Amino acid sequence: MNIEMEKISLANLPTKIERLDYTSNKFKRNIFIKRDDFTGIELSGNKVRKLEYALAEALSQGADTIITCGGIQSNHARATAAAATKLGLKSILILSSDEELPPNGNYLLDMLLGAEVRFISSEDYSHNLKAILNEVAENLKNEGRKGYIIPTGASNGIGTFGYFNALKEIVEQEKQLGLEFDTICCTVGSGGTYAGLCLGNKILNLNRQIIGFNISSTKEYFIDEVIKISKEFYSYLEGNNTLEEADIKIIDGNVGLGYALSTPEELKFLNDFAKNEGIILDPVYTAKAMKGLYSELGNPKTNYLNNSKNILFIHTGGLFGLFPKSLEFEFN
Ligand SMILES: *Cc1c(COP(=O)(O)O)cnc(C)c1O
């Protein structure tokens, strides 16, 4: 099946795939990492793949301002600010924070990139976000401008083409590597990365096992979300091969203290992984997910990985979110 969606090119693709030697030896499997943290600098991480499609849609609708949202250290908001500026558009970022913090990490980059940053409380973020985003767009309209809203993480129908196509990229790279990944893992933060990979797997009949590690909320919440995203994805296509619960394999138990909060064990894991592999994970997403993969390989909670031989983990980026946490590391 040939599914093509219009995009603008923003990311450095294809991103390379590397073998994790220490981790592979430790668990006696072939474990690889796809460096989607290398999609760019300002435009680094998984959100760029989604923005290639979302911003093509925004331009086709004649938008002049991109409105999006996230936590104060949102990688998605920062990537959106960078992409918008690059395309000559304005950006308004609605960020959640209950304290006034100085610009640091992604928030510093948002400011440098010329985004208009507006803070709302975490309470409003959880309960009134949609209304707030719509009001921003409405106010722009009254000024004769045109806003385009991208929801949290660009995890909607259009954004999902990013990882639908990333899976095609992986299949091409397998030919060069001379192997096939039986299992592909990623972090589940707002669900669009996972949904895109799962949809690719299902629609292209690839028969891989796609595993997600949720880093907030619960597995049950994300099963519903991922199904919903798959329906939005199909609003762009003919047919109805949407995801069902049986297609979704999410491993819970790695949320720790909650979204964007780190335990000393998680930070130690991030530090050990850096020392063993020479790769820096991020504290909010990929360290929790990789730690989840380690526990699953070492002491399985599910049987998902028992027969996995060639495993690919997607490094979805997030480096800038590490710097505001520098004082939390034990070597301080
Ligand atoms: C947003 C994000 C994720 C989660 O991806 P979703 O598509 O939102 O589930 C993972 N890693 C990093 C670094 C991110 O910024």
Image: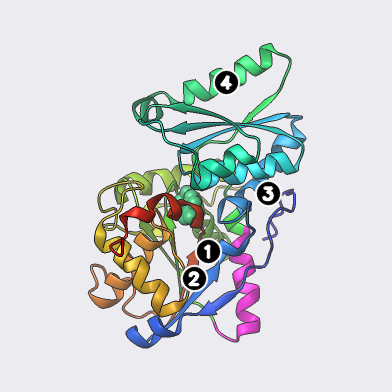
Q: Position of residue 9 (x, y in %)?
A: 74, 53
Q: Are marks 3 and 2 in contact (CB under 8 Å)?
A: no
Task: Say if disc 4 is inside 8 Å of ligand 1.
Answer: no
User: SS of the residue at dot 1?
Assistant: helix
Is residue 176 magenta-colored? yes
Q: Amino acid at mark 4?
A: Val
Nearer the observer, 194 or 48: 48
Residue identified by numbered label 1: 201
Question: Would residue 54 appear left or right of 218 to someone viewing this image?
Answer: right
| Gap in angstroms between the C-alphas marked 4 and 3 | 23 Å
Q: Earlier in the sequence, mark 4 or mark 3?
A: 3
Distance between mark 4 and mark 1 Cα atoms: 37 Å
Give SS at disc 4. Answer: helix
User: Residue 276: x and y, percent?
Assistant: 40, 79
Counting residues from the N terminus, which is met first, the one under dot 3 or under dot 1? Answer: 3
Q: Tell me the number on the disc at residue 136.
A: 4
Between circles 4 and 3, the one closer to the viewer is 4
Q: Residue at x 65, y 40 (%)?
A: 113
Q: Which span of residues is magenta-colored?
A: 165-179
Q: Amino acid at mark 3?
A: Glu
Q: Are marks 2 and 1 in contact (CB under 8 Å)?
A: yes
Question: Residue 52 has which mark?
Answer: 3
Name the N-terminal-most of marks 3 and 2. 3
Secondary structure at badge 2 equals loop
Report whether 195 appears left or right of 224: right
Q: Amino acid at mark 2?
A: Asn
State the CA–CA distance, disc 3 to disc 1: 21 Å
Mark carried by residue 207:
2
